[in-house]
Every structure is written in structure tokens, then in C-alpha cells.
Amino acid sequence: MLKLKLEGKCYKVKTIEINKGVTVLTGPNGSGKSYACRQIKDYLLENNKPYIDIDVYTEGKTIADSFVSQGDMKSVAKYFNASEGQRVFDTLVDVNVPKVGDFVRRLLKDKQKEGFIIMDGCDSGVSIDLLMSIREFISMVLEDCENARIDIHIILTANNYELIPHYDCIWIPTMEHYSRGDEADGYNLWRYRYEEVYKARNKK
């Protein structure tokens, strides 16, 4: 288990615990999920723990630029005519699935007993069917690591409910969201729904 304290006045709850398997950091846009990922990455780096850091949404924009620079107009047309979710999914499959595979093979080669995969923004605009494909990919990684006896920790960020069931979930609220006046009621209804899933998952 990875246990660390998040720095920053924005977090109402400072300490988070991340168990082996999948942990989803969830909350609305701007709630501090990506900031939490950066702090987790810093912690892993300082403690010399093997990890791979993937920002699916940002990498998708970089890929579009590479298509333009290469003169690959067919890929440019496909990219800009696709939905945001499809672009995120294509980036995950075409670029990051091989990266994750290489990372797991490197863990095996180096005889590492644990590893960390941080995936930020993988649910951005993604439809239900694409989310199910992402879940299948995650299950494959978990199974491969279990067979290799590697304790793998997959840390995802999501503001989409469908990615969360059956995974550990940490709600990442910020003080800012509780001070938005009229928006607070809708925000709290959303938070309560996630908390119901979290309680059911952890039988609390």
C-alpha cells in the first residue's frame, strides 16, 4: 500500500492510501486530480520506485501536431473529424498501450516486485463502449502482472462514473468547490452518488 499526504490548501482531506490494483482519483474538472498525480509521481521518483506516467489528453494534442509536421493529411483529417473521446481512445491504444507493455516487460527483466502506472485524463469525452474497452485493457494488465507476481498499482483520474465501479475510488474534492454558492447543491448530489459507489465497493 502507498500512503502519502497531499500538499496544498485546496485539499480538504490530505492523506490518501493507494492499494495494489486499480485506484481511481475522481471528481469534477479542476478538483485537483492531476495535481494529486503530480505529487504521487514526485513521491515515486524521490523513493526510486518504478513508474510510468501517461497524460492521455495532452499526448493526443501532441500526436495531432506530429501528423501535421509529417504531412500525414489522412491521419490529420481522421483526428480532427473524430470526437474528443475517440481521439483520447486512439491515443491510448496507438501510443500508450505499447508503452505500458514495455513498462511491464521492463519490470520483469529487472526482477521488480512492484510498479506504478499513472494514467491521467483517460476518460475525457469517452463514450460508454470505449470506457468498457479501457476497462478490458486494464484487466489484461492486472492479469499479466498477477501471473508475473508483480504488485502493480494503476492510478487513474476520471470524472466519469462508468470507469469507477469495482475499483477503489478516492474522491478528490477541493475547498473551492464547496464555496461556489448555488452550484454547491448540484455538486453535492454528484458527490453523494460517488460516495454510494465507494461505500458499496468497500462495504462501509
Image: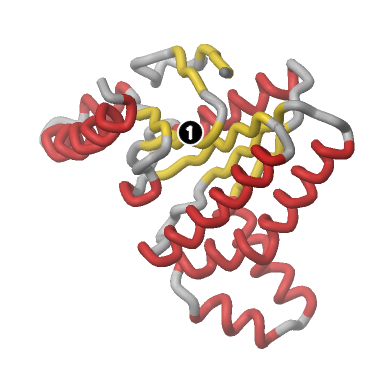
For the residue labelled by badge 1, is the local secondary structure a helix, a strand or a loop?
strand
Q: Considering depth in this image, is 65 or 127 the residue closer to the camera?
A: 127
Q: Compared to 171, does 126 lie above or below?
A: below
Q: Considering depth in this image, is 201 or 191 the residue closer to the camera?
A: 201
- Quadrant containing the N terminus is top right
Q: Considering depth in this image, is 74 or 4 the residue closer to the camera?
A: 4
Q: Compared to 130, does 77 lie above or below?
A: below
Q: Does 30 sit left or right of 58 as displayed?
A: left
Residue 165 drawn at (x, y percent): 34, 43
Q: Which residue is mark 1?
A: 23
Residue 33 drawn at (x, y percent): 46, 34
Residue 177 drawn at (x, y percent): 27, 30
Q: Quadrant of residue 149?
A: top right
- Quadrant containing the C terminus is top left
The residue located at (60%, 30%) in the rendering is 38
Q: Compared to 84, does 7 lie above or below?
A: above
Extreme residue in the front direction: 147
The residue located at (69%, 61%) in the rendering is 95
Colour option used = secondary structure
Q: Compared to 159, does 123 lie above or below?
A: below
The residue located at (45%, 36%) in the rendering is 24
Q: Does 44 sit left or right of 203 as displayed?
A: right
Residue 122 drawn at (x, y percent): 51, 52
Q: Does 13 sit left or right of 65 as displayed?
A: left
Q: Report crowding for label 1: few under 14, some 14 to 19, many 20 or more residues within 10 A (C-alpha).
A: many
Amino acid at the residue labelled 1? Thr
Extreme residue in the bottom direction: 74
Q: Quadrant of residue 83?
A: bottom left
Q: Does 37 sit left or right of 63 as displayed?
A: left
The residue located at (52%, 30%) in the rendering is 35
Q: Considering depth in this image, is 70 or 1 the residue closer to the camera?
A: 1
Q: How many marks?
A: 1
